[in-house]
Image: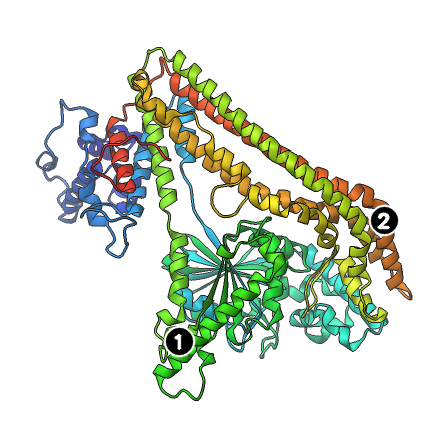
Amino acid sequence: MDDFVCGILTECGLSQLIERFEEQFITKESLYCLDDQEIADLIPFMGPRAIFKKRLKVLKKEQNTANPETVDSFTQVHPSTSGTSDEGKRSLDLQGESSQCQSPTKKPRLERKPGSYTEEILLSDVKHIMRYVDYKIPKKDNELNNFLRRQICDLETDKREMVGVFGRTGAGKSSLINAVIGVKNLLPSGRISACTSVMIKVEANMENSKYEADIEFITEEEWKDELWSSTNFLRDYVDQKSDQNEKDDYPDIGEKLSALYGEEWKHKSPKDLADGRYLKEIQEFLHPKRKMLTGETAEELSAKLVIYIKSGSKDGVKKLYWPLVKCVTIRVPNNDLLKHVTLVDLPGNGDCNKSRDKMWKTVVGSCSTVWVVADINRAVSEKEPWEILTSACSFMGNAGQCQQIHFICTKSDESKDPEHHSPTDARAFILETNDQAKKEVREKFNNLNEVTKHFSDESFKAFTVSSFEFLKKTILDADDTEIPKLQEYLQGLNDCHSVTLNYVSGAVGILSLIQGARLTDGADKTAVCTDLKQKMRDALDKVKKTMEGTYQAFEKCLREGVEKSESSCEEKLKSVINPNKSGSGFHSTLKCIVQHNGTHKPKKKKQINLNMKLSSCLTESIDEKFKKTFPNEGEGGQFNGVLNLFSLDTKMMIKKPEYKDVELQLIFLNTEEEKIKTKLNKIIRDRKKTIYSSLTATIETSMQPCYDDAKKIRGAGSLETMRSIIVKHVLESKKVMFQRAKEVMLSQLKDLMRDILEDLKKTMQESIELSLKTDGVSIPDVKDELQMVKNHYKELMGNPDEEQIICID
């Protein structure tokens, strides 16, 4: 250890931090280079940190005057603390330093007294305190020390909300996103159309002040598969001499291949096109890794990015690379609205590429809000936005976590009547038209039975926006454009009050455990431990019985669903593979369906999904029950609801005199109980998506053999041959296929029930035992730290002057 650094720390009463400075290789030279954040990371508490910074300032002054032999001035800076305890040195005036750091632009969540913390500063301070406590825990490897370190580590949480944005090209999505986040020309709009296959995420850059784009490509093997299926499809399409009217029934493969290869692809085999020399400009694709683009401005980044997301005319560009792009993540610097929110510009409803389609389903299922964007003049009449909403609703609802659907009518300023010459009349006419548009949009939503099965009327909101007027304000006020309403909504999603509250309450619990164990060392806590374990068993029994009742209800629903599926599967199959279409034309569509394992998205028509069609009776049988069991809104439902009622009754025990000696341990157990319930609620939310989707996924797996056989069919009569293969497979498999889907879902449901009960029992049992059996263990004194964090907790709850039990409802 550098003797100079060691001496300075000892002088400042921070000898306990010598090892930490040594671990970070702090020498005399690097000591002078430390900035405020680095000092804060090394010295968590403000009091000692202020003393250290003042001493360092003196040292720097001495160094600058080239007089290193100056008499030590520490005694004038801080009188000797000999004879006082370490705890006394840590008794801090927290508000003194924090109030100077408080951002004047950051609005506190609650009305507070002058000098109080903003939540961001408060959370940062508590994290510093807990890092310091982690350092104080003895390095000795024992059960309690390891448990405490895990508890502190588990406090770290992050909140990120995802908002999905749907809408056809030209509806104003890019202009809307640019206006809402306040960045001009970030996403290309106007004459440049974004590709319908590329997913674009927009989030904050928290690392530096540059605009960045992270481009993720599909794999080379996936592209080879796509080339093979595309060229085979085109050959079959020509061989069958498909009808002109059916040309929109298949993806525009020619546009995709021309984007990358020009017209040369027409004379090459898939093997030739897969040769890396054609794509040597993108080494990141050939040697799988992500491509990073940066720009000082949004315009600079957008210009570099356009060849990876643009479709349509090349406008002099030699190649467009969007067919190889899986996802683009754009990071915007200094943007508070995106700090904890990601906006995702989504393709309509999936993709023929497997990895892009898988990512699409994952992202849609992770959106807490969805914006459906449509031109106000065609908002109700245009099919595409409503078809997107209908086809994606199950991925957002029962198979997702979406709580809000916002239907956004763009270009509201274009509805003005040319007869209204004065701005006042024009504004009145626009606002009247906006109200009518909202009314019609809501009526349309209420008539979508497929969607309303997953979403209630309260989940749907309509907006009429004008990005142009928001920026220019020629006729409308900013509030009239409703862009501020969307910004306010995003700001609400950024609100991390719950994250801060969970962290601080968890910190109170851990510090209560440490201090309680220190104060009651040697006391007999056997009776309390026994009482708590019995309460835990009783609470677990209630959770188990409720979940078992829900399981039986699902079993009954699925039994009926299997019966309906077996009796109606032929009719449902016929509606997909044998519609009222001419044979030559439908051949191309069916070829696409089998090529992509049961799904096909025509360029200008509704998506076809044979697997979902076959599983529809199963999903319909459980839709209502599933929504009530796993609602996206609120914390209710048979699973989340009963879990939230799980309790060891520690709040009542704290109030009883006989438990006074273990009050701090009970506070810890209360916060630990809330923490495990929060964790399990997140697990339930994620697992329920897989459980619901398993019905269609199992049907797809069961159908895979006939898809594989149908892919091989070529030549005359291939349409009827493909149909017969599929029909034969379904008829032979229906007694097994639907029953298997039922069993898989119930098995996954049972696994979730088991994991919930096991996690609850294991976590609470370990917490009870370790909090009440700590005799003979070396435990640090955290009295001061506990009081500081309690004060912060009371500040968060809005009653800093009142004493209260630190328990979370």
Give the residue at x 20% y 30%: 10
Frontmost residue, 680 versus 268 = 680
Percent across and percent down for residue 306 are: 53, 70
Q: Is residue 305 left or right of residue 156?
A: right
Residue on which the image places disc 1: 469
Task: Mark yes or no: residue 142 visible.
Answer: no
Badge 2 element: helix
Question: Which residue is rendered at x = 31% and y = 47% of the image?
Answer: 120
The residue under the point 83% across, 50% down is: 730
Residue 19 % position (x, y): 31, 30
Q: Earlier in the sequence, mark 1 or mark 2?
A: 1
Residue 699 higher or lower than 14, as above or below: below
Which image quadrant for residue 747?
top right
Q: Is residue 426 visible?
A: yes
Tally the numbered discs.
2
- Amino acid type, mark 1: Glu
Residue 18 in the image: state x and y as whole percent.
Answer: 28, 30
For disc 2, the marked residue is: 731
x and y percentages locating residue 646 in the rendered image: 47, 30
* Amino acid type shown at disc 2: Leu
Numbered label attached to residue 324? none
Residue at image point 42% right, 45% down: 158
Frontmost residue, 593 versus 128: 593
Spatial distance from mark 1 to mark 2, Cα to Cα? 59 Å
Q: Is residue 64 above or below residue 472?
A: above
